[in-house]
Amino acid sequence: MSADLNQVMMDLGRRARHASGLLAQIDTETKNKALIQAAKGLRGQAAAIKAANHIDMEAGRAKGLDKAQLDRLMLDDKRIEAMAKGLEDIAALPDPVGRVLDAWDRPNGLHIERVAVPLGVIGIIYESRPNVTVDASALCLKSGNAAILRGGSESFHSSSAILAAFHAGLDMAGIDREVIQMVPTPDRAAVGILLTMTDYVDVLVPRGGKSLIARVRAESRIPLFQHLDGNCHTYVEESAPVEMVRKVVMNAKMRRTGICGATETLLVDAKAVRSHLPVLVKDLLEAGCAVRGDGVTQLIDSRVTLATEEDWRTEFLDAIIAVKVVDGVDEAIRHINAYGSAHTEAILTENRDSAEKFLRGCHSAICLWNASTQFADGGEFGMGAEIGISTGKLHARGPVGLEQLCTMKYVVYGHGQVRPG
């Protein structure tokens, strides 16, 4: 680690800490103005953003990134418009800062309020998805937090161009650019420094693969919102209408295979093998999805390969799915809790008792009944956007949006009370 890089990171931290104090005093109208102007900036600078993304995409191909990784990296007009719309959606949401979460009066006349306040400075470490740059920037700004962004080397040019458009929005609203800063180098040593910056960073949000998360968990001295891999499951029962199941399973797996909410393992109840399994396997194979199944599933189609123990634990992020036949909802729950990553699970059934047992029994952050796992997204939850899906069990869990980026403090109103002897 060079002394120069250490100095760069410490300067970044000092500026972020100072900016967080200024941002905490900025009113909702000003923050919303910045977000609206940033949306205009993204649209106005779409050509520059796509040009920067082209550099990253070419470098990614040369580096040997696979199809799923390139899909996560790619920006086009549709995705840039989605980012801009996300900024406008966040501007339209209520400001979480200053909310009175609870209030009560004591017999001695004290009035006590529990009030939502910003966390302070948030460090976001992410890999190849450049849209995280705008989502994280917007959520941190609206929730009153300064941010230090460290995107992956694969998306460095794209993220830099996106941040330039966001900074233009801050300029228009008169907000210091230093409330949202990016680590100015793809050097991996910068991550190691960021993990130790306890004087400047209050919370870290790592978003990426297992190796990144493992490193952050092992080395960080700063509290984390943990975002583990998305080994998501869909479980199918006999009572679920076949056409509904076909539609949901195909969406859950194939809509976008490279996102963390994509179903990676399909569990089918033994009673649904004849009615549901053959058509589901056929649909998946014909859509270009490789199927790795247990012995029963292999009998359905010769193109199904035998699943290994490791397949049940794997987040494929590709057109690959593991399929297993289970003996009822209890076995489905046991499988998910044993092999899953506590991200997102779905049950497809018309049996309310089974559904409620599944929703209670799965330990994951998000559980759905008769819906695609690809709804595991803050935007789809009406939160405008998300900074990640937290699979930990403390403070924030599931989509981390505006409310989850606040903590609380107690404000006490008196009129001269003193505590007796």
Image (spheres, rainbow, N blue to C red):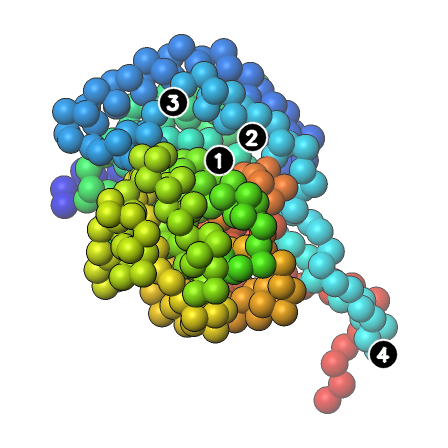
| Picture residue at 31% right of the left edge, 35% below the top | 288
Distance (Cα) linking label 2 and label 1: 7 Å
Distance (Cα) linking label 3 and label 4: 59 Å
Residue position for label 4: 107
Residue position for label 3: 75
- Residue closest to the eye, 115 or 303: 303
Q: The disc labelled 1 sits on which kind of residue? A: Asp
**Which of the numbered marks, if any, corresponds to residue 160?**
none
**Label 2–label 3 contact, CB within 8 A:** no
**Label 1–label 3 contact, CB within 8 A:** no
Q: The disc labelled 3 sits on which kind of residue? A: Leu
- Residue closest to the eye, 183 or 312: 312
The picture places residue 37, in percent across and down from the top left corner, at: 58, 20
**Looking at the image, is mark 2 or mark 4 nearer the viewer?**
2
Q: The disc labelled 2 sits on which kind of residue? A: Gly
The earlier-in-sequence mark between 1 and 3 is 3
Q: Is residue 296 left or right of residue 147?
A: left
Residue position for label 1: 135
Which quadrant would residue 351 be assigned to in this image?
bottom right
- Dot 2 lies on which element? helix
The picture places residue 359, in percent across and down from the top left corner, at: 56, 65
The earlier-in-sequence mark between 3 and 4 is 3
The picture places residue 305, in percent across and down from the top left corner, at: 22, 51
Distance (Cα) linking label 2 and label 4: 47 Å
**Looking at the image, is mark 3 or mark 4 nearer the viewer?**
3
